[in-house]
C-alpha cells in the first residue's frame, strides 16, 4: 500500500467546534443509548417480544461497530466534516422513525440508522480532534469528547427515565433531532480535513460482507439463543457461519493490500492494549440493561426512579474524565487505565449483591453506579489518547474507526450477552438470580480488561 499524505491544516480548533463535536457524539451516547432504561416502556407501547426488543437495543451498537471502520476510512478520503454531516443526517432520520414507530419494522430500522449515524460521527470527529488540536489542547479536547461519550452513557439512564415518565419515551428522540440540528449549526464553517491518497486500490468489499454477516449472525445467536434453543438447528447453523466467517475474514484481511481492517496498527502494543481493553470495558454496558430491568421488574421501581439511581454515575464520570486527563499528563496512561477498570468492576460488584433487601439494596446500586462512573471516567482519556497518539496522521480516521468499533461491538455484544443471561434466567420469574448472573458476567469483562491493560500495554519509561 502506498503512502498517504495528510493535507496540512492551518485552522486551529475552537471551543465552538468542540461543543458541536460533543453534541454530535451525544446523539448516540445520550439519546440512542437511553433505550437501555426505557426498554420496558418501548416494549409495552409497540407490543413487541423481548427477543425483538433485545435485537433492536443491540442493533445500534452492532451496526455502529460493523461500519465504523469503513466510515473512518471514508472520513480520511472524502473528508471528516462530510462524514460528520452525513452522520447527523442519519441521526435525524433514525430518530424520526422511532418517534413515529408503530411496530417492529420502523423500530429496528430506526435503530440501525442510529448505528450508522454513530459509525460516521465517532471516527470523523475523533480525527478532527487529532487534526485541529495539539498537545494539551488535544488532551483537553479528548476529555470533552469523552464527556460526550462516557458522560452521555452515564446521563442516558437518568435522562431517558425522566423523559419517558413525564413526556413519553418518543420525546427522547425528538430531543435527539433537535441536538443533531444544533450540532450541525455549530460545526458549520469548519475547514474540511482529509487525506490525499497516492494509491487507488479497490475497496475491500468481500471483507466487509464477511464481517457484516459474521457479526449479525453472532448478535442473533446471543439475542435469540435462549428463545430458539441453544442446540436448535438455526442457532447451530448460525454458529457455523460465525466461525467460518471470522476465520475467512482474518485470512483475507491479513493478506490483503487494501484491507477493511488494517492489522498493521495492532503491531503497536499501546494501540492494541487500548483497543482490547476498550472493547471489554464497553461490554460492561450490559450492566445498564440488567440493573435497569431488574429494579423495575424485580423491585417495582418506575423508570424515573431507576434513572435517579444513576445520578452518582453521571456526576462522577464527568468529574473523573478530567482527573484521568491530569493523571495521564503526570504518570502516563497505563496506571489510570488499570485503576479505572478496577473501579468499574467494584461498582458492578456492589450492584450484584442482590441478596440484600429493601432500601439497603438501592443504596448499594447508587454506590455501585458511582464507582462504575468513576472508573469509566478515569479510563476514558488515557485510553483514547494512547490509541490515537500511537498512529500516524494519515491513518487517524481508520485507527479511530477501529478503536471505536471496539467500543460499539463491545457495547452491543455486552448488552446482548447480559440481556440474554438476565432474560433467560428471569423468564421463570426469578429476577434476582437473573440479575445476579447477568451482573457477574460484567464483572468478568472488567477483570479481562484489567489483564489486557496489564499484559499488553508497555510500562512507561521513567
Image: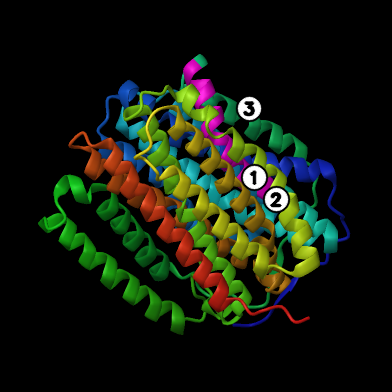
* Dominant SS in magenta: helix
User: For numbered disc 2, what is the local secondary structure?
Assistant: helix
Distance in Å between CA atoms under marks 3 and 2: 26 Å
Local packing at callout 3 (Cα closer than 10 Å; few below 14, some 14-19, many 20+) is few
Disc 1 to disc 2: CB gap under 8 Å: yes
User: For numbered disc 1, what is the local secondary structure?
Assistant: helix
Q: For residue 247: magenta?
A: no
Which residue position holds label 2? 321
**N-terminal of the two: label 3 or label 1?**
3
The answer to whether residue 13 is left or right of residue 429 is: right
Q: Quadrant of the N terminus?
A: bottom right
Whole-percent x and y of residue 454?
56, 74
Q: Which range of residues does the magenta coloring cover?
A: 145-165
Q: Nearer the viewer, mark 3 or mark 2?
A: 2
Q: Which mark is residue 115?
A: none
> Outermost residue, top direction?
166
Depicted 186 relative to depicted 274: above or below: above
Q: At 27% from the left edge and 70% from the top edge, which residue is drawn?
A: 243
Whole-percent x and y of residue 335?
66, 67
The answer to whether residue 96 is left or right of residue 242 is: right
Depicted 290 relative to depicted 243: above or below: above
Which residue position holds label 3? 178
Local packing at callout 2 (Cα closer than 10 Å; few below 14, some 14-19, many 20+) is many
Whole-percent x and y of residue 159?
56, 28
Q: Is residue 76 shown to the viewer in this render?
A: no
Q: Is residue 290 shown to the viewer in this render?
A: yes
**Quadrant in the rendering for residue 188:** top right
Whole-percent x and y of residue 279?
49, 61
Q: At 68% from the left edge and 45% from the top edge, which residue is drawn?
A: 147
Amino acid at each position: 500500500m502506498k503512502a498517504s499524505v495528510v493535507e496540512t491544516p492551518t485552522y486551529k480548533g475552537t471551543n465552538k467546534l468542540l461543543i458541536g463535536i460533543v453534541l454530535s457524539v451525544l446523539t448516540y451516547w445520550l439519546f440512542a443509548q437511553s433505550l437501555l432504561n426505557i426498554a420496558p416502556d418501548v416494549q409495552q407501547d409497540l407490543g413487541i417480544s423481548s427477543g425483538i426488543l433485545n435485537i433492536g437495543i443491540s442493533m445500534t451498537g452492532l451496526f455502529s461497530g460493523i461500519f465504523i471502520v469503513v466510515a473512518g476510512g471514508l472520513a480520511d478520503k472524502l473528508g471528516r466534516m462530510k462524514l460528520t454531516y452525513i452522520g447527523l443526517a442519519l441521526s435525524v432520520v433514525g430518530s424520526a422513525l422511532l418517534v413515529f414507530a408503530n411496530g417492529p419494522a420502523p423500530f429496528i430500522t430506526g435503530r440501525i440508522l442510529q448505528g450508522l449515524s454513530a459509525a460516521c460521527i465517532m471516527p470523523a470527529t475523533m480525527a478532527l480532534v487529532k487534526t485541529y488540536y495539539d498537545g494539551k489542547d488535544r488532551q483537553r479536547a479528548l476529555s470533552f469528547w469523552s464527556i460526550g461519550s462516557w458522560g452521555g452513557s452515564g446521563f442516558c439512564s437518568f435522562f431517558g427515565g425522566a423523559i419517558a415518565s413525564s413526556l413519553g419515551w418518543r420525546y427522547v428522540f425528538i430531543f435527539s433531532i433537535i441536538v443533531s440540528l444544533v450540532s450541525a449549526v455549530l460545526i458549520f464553517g469548519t475547514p474540511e480535513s482529509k487525506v490525499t491518497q497516492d494509491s487507488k486500490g479497490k475497496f475491500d468489499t468481500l471483507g466487509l460482507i464477511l464481517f457484516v454477516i459474521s457479526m449479525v449472525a453472532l448478535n442473533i445467536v446471543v439475542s435469540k439463543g435462549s428463545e430458539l434453543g441453544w442446540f436448535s438447528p438455526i442457532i447451530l447453523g448460525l454458529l457455523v457461519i460465525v466461525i467460518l466467517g471470522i476465520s475467512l475474514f482474518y485470512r483475507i484481511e491479513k493478506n490483503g493490500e487494501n484491507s477493511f481492517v488494517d492489522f498493521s496498527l495492532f503491531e503497536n502494543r499501546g494501540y492494541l492494549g487500548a483497543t482490547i481493553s476498550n472493547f471489554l470495558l464497553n461490554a460492561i454496558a450490559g450492566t445498564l440493561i440488567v440493573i435497569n430491568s431488574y429494579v423495575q421488574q424485580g423491585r417495582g421501581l418506575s423508570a424515573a426512579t431507576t434513572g435517579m439511581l444513576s445520578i452518582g454515575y453521571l456526576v462522577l464520570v464527568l468529574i473523573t474524565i478530567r482527573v484521568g486527563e491530569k493523571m495521564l499528563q503526570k504518570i502516563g496512561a497505563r496506571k489510570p487505565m488499570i485503576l479505572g477498570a478496577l473501579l468499574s468492576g467494584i461498582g458492578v460488584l456492589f450492584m450484584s449483591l442482590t441478596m440484600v433487601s429493601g432500601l439497603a439494596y438501592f443504596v448499594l446500586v447508587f454506590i455501585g453506579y458511582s464507582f462504575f462512573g468513576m472508573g469509566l471516567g478515569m479510563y476514558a482519556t488515557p485510553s483514547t489518547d494512547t490509541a490515537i497518539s500511537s498512529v500516524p496522521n494519515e491513518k487517524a480516521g481508520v485507527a479511530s474507526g477501529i478503536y471505536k468499533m471496539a467500543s460499539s461491538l463491545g457495547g452491543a455484544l455486552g448488552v446482548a450477552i447480559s440481556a440474554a443471561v438476565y432474560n433467560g434466567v428471569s423468564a421463570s420469574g426469578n429476577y434476582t438470580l437473573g440479575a445476579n448472573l447477568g451482573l457477574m458476567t460484567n464483572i468478568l469483562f472488567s477483570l479481562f480488561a484489567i489483564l489486557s491493560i496489564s499484559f499488553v500495554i508497555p510500562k512507561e519509561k521513567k
